[in-house]
Amino acid sequence: MSTRNLSEKSITKAVIARNSKAESARFKTVITSLVKNLHRFARDVKLTEDEWNYGIDFLTRTGQLCSDKRQEFILLSDTLGLSTLVTQLNHHSRGKETEQTVFGPFHREKAPVYAMGDNISKGIRGVPCFVSGKISDAKGKPIAGAVLDVWHSDDDGAYDVQRAEWKGAMRMRGVFKPGPDGKFHLRTVRPKYYPVPTDGPTGELLKAAARHPMRPAHIHFMVNAKGYDRLVTHVFVKGDEYIDSDAVFGVRDSLISKFKMHKAGKAPDGTVVRTPYCTLHYDFVMRPAKKAGKKDGARKK
Ligand code: BEZ
Ligand code: FE
């Protein structure tokens, strides 16, 4: 079939046909829908050439900002709600299992491995925070061999990577390996709300849409355990002023928890704390990994 003299009406079919010999059926499904919806979008808003040029420049600058320390495309996806949409499509909330939420750009590989009870925020200013919980399956059976990765912002809402003066040191993050009882506990400082980075194209978008860039205070957790789906989630601080307007749409009721304040004195780990401190208790419930060939869509919601 000739693809000469295409019009605004015939172009979409021609592009879809040109991709139709792709070997992978999944690729064909994805590229066909992408072309259809991209063209539908351009028709819908009657995209001008200036706007198309602006869009190309916006995406170019987004890519140029990406590095091993910064992922502007993920940030864009987060603020457009695409990350939460993909999380929800792939991890339907089900019963007692802990809900997933966005991964975010601040996780770092090879964080220090700590002994149970250790302080991951030594020397960092803030309200001391004692975190504890258990990792189990939906029947409450502890999961032996689970690996818990924790990371969060400090009392000023900054992650270690955002503090140039720390010269790449890993702080307020660490890996814990609970024993056969699945229990964990650690010490840190209470996190604070913070703005997502706004010095790039995503900031430009937020400004144009008259949106604030804030995320409510939270601690990130990732749990890996053999035979279970990887759990990527946060626990949010109950009562945070941004809890209902998270810039990246990641808050879920089941992930909001009280960071309970206590007077100065003996802390849960037996140490004496000279300032008021808080405690967070949160149990993580893992989902068994899918059996090969079984689709998630086949599960009951
Ligand atoms: C975070 O929680 O670390 C985060 C998530 C999405 C965008 C920016 C930051
Ligand atoms: Fe975060």
Image: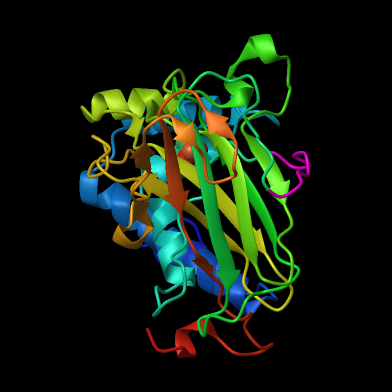
Q: What residue is drawn where x is 30% and y is 52%?
A: 41
**Could you tell me what secondary structure mostly forms the magenta stretch?**
loop
Quarter the C terminus occupies: bottom left
Q: Is residue 258 above or below residue 93?
A: above
Whether residue 3 is visible, yes or no, is yes
Residue 270 position, x and y percent, is 59, 42
Q: Is residue 92 left or right of residue 291?
A: left
Residue 269 position, x and y percent, is 59, 44
Q: Nearer the viewer, residue 75 or 40?
A: 75
Residue 9 position, x and y percent, is 31, 60
Q: What residue is drawn where x is 51% and y is 82%?
A: 296
Q: Nearer the viewer, residue 279 or 165?
A: 279
Q: Nearer the viewer, residue 220 or 189?
A: 189
Residue 36 position, x and y percent, is 39, 63
- Quadrant location of residue 180? bottom right
Q: What residue is drawn where x is 50% and y is 37%?
A: 266
The boundaries of the magenta stretch are: 108-116
Q: Nearer the viewer, residue 92 or 288?
A: 288
Taking the view exactly as shown, the residue that stands out farthest to the top is 165
Q: Is residue 188 above or below residue 295?
A: above
Quarter the N terminus occupies: bottom right
- Quadrant location of residue 122? top right
- Quadrant location of residue 96? bottom left
